[in-house]
Image (tube, grey):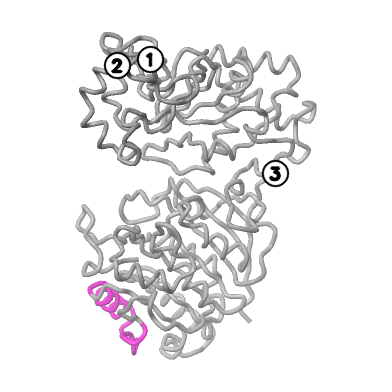
Amino acid sequence: MSSSSGIYNLRSNGSTHGDVFTRREVVAYMLDSVGYTPENNLSRISILEPSCGNGEFIVEILKRLEDSSLRFGFDFNLAFRQCVLAYEIDSQKVDECIQRVKANFPSLQGIENRIVCADFLLANGTPVDVVVGNPPYIRYEEIPLNKRELYKSIFYTFHFRTDIYVLFFEKSIRMLKPNGRHCFICANRWIKNQYGKKLRSLIANGLRICRIINMEHADAFHEEVLAYPAITLLEKTPPKGRFEYASADSIAELQDIHFSTLNAPSDDDWDNVFSDYGNIDNLTSIERQGFKIGIGVATGADSLFVSPSLPDIVEMELLLPVLNAKNLTGDTFAWDGRYLLNPYNEDGGLVRLDDFPMAKAYLEKNYDKLAKRHKATMNPSKWYATIDPIRRSLLSEPKILLPDISGNRFLFVDKGQFYPQHNLYYITGKNERSLKMLAALLMSDFIKSQLHNLSNHMNGGYARWQSQYLRKLRIPQLSALPDRLASDLLAAYDNRDYASINQIVDRIVTDSSCPLASRNNRVIPKQLSISFDFS
């Protein structure tokens, strides 16, 4: 795949945005997956590569077409001119691709007519049997404004801050003939992100999902990139209820990969599809069990509202001991003596500054900075309000503390001594004992597996503890746990015994002797075998 340096900006390595080329082993696997092999008569199988770059897919396609012509006795040149088509927006890459094809197939004619320099998204396309390739990755911000507006007017899937590869999906899917096959390797973000919402709906309602292979940890490209790729195999037939799913940690695993069978999505919500736990019964959400999920306070001026020196300059009755994510790093809980200035009274309104002369002097000294904040410009009389309201009662509530991005294994439960800042999510409700049990569940591999499939990961592989993902987690009903299991889970939490936590949670969700265990609790992996009829 590729993009034009005349249209898109350069990346830091000197390549253009979108230039990430697929390894030959992956190309071969994808062509095998769609059934484009020389053992089949390929003389009438039309195939499209919508962003060919310097020709990795095209060269392999032509090798297979030539081998098929020798087996079945058809004209290789004629089949190429009738059935193979590639697009590339970068003229330099087109030239490289054409020269590479000529070097490998010196007798081939009419190459320039079948490897076209054009914007595939705007080209007139004809229906094809097979689409295969690696579409460009161009973030919303990198798409030129004139192109962005034009694409928005054309493509149904242009939603929110979409990446351009989503549009390549839509255009090429719509070009498929009935029973046609479609196989892309590209970023898997569309499966989870908001910008992939309409593409997910398009696929769920109009195609059969055959298989998806997560390749986040496999070296699928010629350079190391943070592309989080996945191979997606689709077929233009009515949707079916199940599909094959696997993760490959290396290219070599593709040759002997084992698949789980998962429920196919039926709409744009795919959050709970990609998990070995997707079919477990007797699970509910955190909030349905009486817990509440929240995020810490954003002040809009932390340097003024949060400081260890505040007790010396404002009244103590306005101060709350405060925590942020830095206080919970390295599996340690270390308060650094900082306080939050709370300008609100018990009723939720702002305090009268005349009642607090020290706070009044401090805030008025910093009036210029506080009054410039957006919230203050919208309501000048509340110039000393924080961006988020502060609910003082939260301070004394026990709560699980969850740093937004964290490499911690242990999740701390605050007994009711601190107020969280905006980079901490928290869970309240019920008592400290129930919260510790919930924290233990959240520390288990069972939940990590769900979170891995629900959330996008930052550099370093850390999942994000965000409310949107916490609300989608499914957990056993804690109030129904037998006393012995509950006590064991609490002891494992207090001792930070992660192995025991996993054993207990696995028993809860998989052991048929446990009252909460599912009767439909696991998907049994199996070797996938898919064949296509080209007749």
* Residue 329 shows up from this direction: no
User: Of the residues under marks 2 and 1, which one precedes in the sequence?
Assistant: 1
Label 1 environment density (alpha carbons within 10 Å; few <14, some 14–19, many ≥20)? some
> Which residue carries the number 1 mark?
318
Label 3 environment density (alpha carbons within 10 Å; few <14, some 14–19, many ≥20)? some
Q: Nearer the viewer, residue 157 or 119?
A: 157
Q: Which residues are magenta?
A: 92-114
> Which residue carries the number 2 mark?
359
Q: Could you tell me which secondary element the residue under label 3 belongs to?
A: loop
**Magenta-drawn stretch contains 102:** yes
Seen in the picture, residue 341 relative to 292 is either above or below; the reply is: above
**Marks 2,1: beta carbons within 8 A:** yes
* Three-letter residue code for mark 2: Ala
> What type of secondary structure mainly makes up the magenta span?
helix
**Marks 1,3: beta carbons within 8 A:** no
In the image, taking residue 56 as reference, residue 499 lies left or right, namely right
Q: CA distance from mark 3 to mark 2?
A: 56 Å
**How far across and down, in percent of the image, does residue 200 sit?**
55, 59
> Which residue carries the number 3 mark?
279
Q: Could you tell me which secondary element the residue under label 2 belongs to?
A: helix
Q: Nearer the viewer, residue 223 or 284?
A: 284
